[in-house]
Image (tube, rainbow, N blue to C red):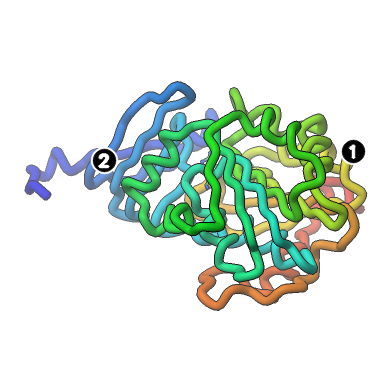
Amino acid sequence: MEVWPKRIMDIWFTEKQSPNMKLSLRIKNILLNKTTEFQDILVVETEEYGKIMVLDGAIQITEKDEFCYHEMMAHIPICAHSHPRRVLIIGGGDGGVLRECLKHPFIEEAILVDIDSEVVQASRDYFPHVSSGMNDPRATILNMDALTFIREHKHEFDIVIVDSTDPVDFAAGLFQSPFYTDVFEALRSEGIMIAQTESPFAEASLLKQAYKEMEKVFPIVSLCWGAMPTYPTGFWTYTVGSKTVTPEEPRNPAPLDCKYYTSRIHSNSFVLPPFLEALIELK
Ligand code: AG3
């Protein structure tokens, strides 16, 4: 890389996480900055978190902390299920969740449906470690609207993972009960879904809405949480909807090379601090 004068190295990327809160990271290098049919994609190299991918101004992955989120999203539902075989990933075009799903040898097929092929390509180009699962023969990647795809696939999947962006624009419908009904119908009889449901500090009402909407559809709904340093407030939630099994206990072992998820983290991530129980009115 070229050597720049000091003042030129003082360039920062800022995510406006809310009207009153920002996260800024010093940039080393700008790798990709383009507008696709669906969104703006930015890939920059930062001092603190390595390469990061940003969609419409919101950080989606960083090299340093992506494992926290991707491991929870994949292993919570897969390990809660007694014999999962087929997985559907909605969104998640970077492939991080896909990579985690394919760590389980008993997963026979994983289909990833992301509306934007350019996110998939950017991940292949700049995040080989995140996108590594895309070359697995068990993986299929489709670029289409997941809302359309899911309506055409009934009773086909054991696990559905909703790895969406924040619920704005084309992702807004992914936090509402008509979509959860489609997911319910796409699942087989012991099926489990998980969705990322934002931070209880930054987006309490969105989290509550997603939880309540899922409760309209699934007989069992359970909330778990974990650390995710570069997402707003660093405290992240995941909501699980299940047809028959309780999701709190792992039934399959954790893959050996996890850096965040363990079987103990699995059960303990469902233990909620009282403010979170109160938010979803468990007490
Ligand atoms: N999808 C959830 C990202 C939400 C982040 N929000 C934000 N930065 N404001 C992540 C996709 C990773 N596979």
Instruction: Identify which amino acid the numbered label 1 is placed on.
Output: Lys
| Residue at 62%, 41% in the rendered image | 90
- Residue 97 placement: quadrant: bottom right
Q: Which mark is residue 153?
A: none
| Residue at disc 2, secondary structure | strand
| Residue at 8%, 47% in the rendered image | 2
- Residue 14 placement: quadrant: top left
Of the numbered discs 1 and 2, the one sitting upstream in the chain is 2
Q: Is residue 57 positioned above or below 230 on the image? A: above
| Residue at 36%, 35% in the rendered image | 42
Q: Which sits in the foreground, 245 or 134?
A: 134
Q: Position of residue 177 (x, y in %)?
A: 81, 33
Residue to which mark 2 is pinned: 31
Q: Position of residue 40 (x, y in %)?
A: 41, 28
Q: Position of residue 9 (x, y in %)?
A: 17, 43
- Quadrant of the image where one finds ligand 1: top right
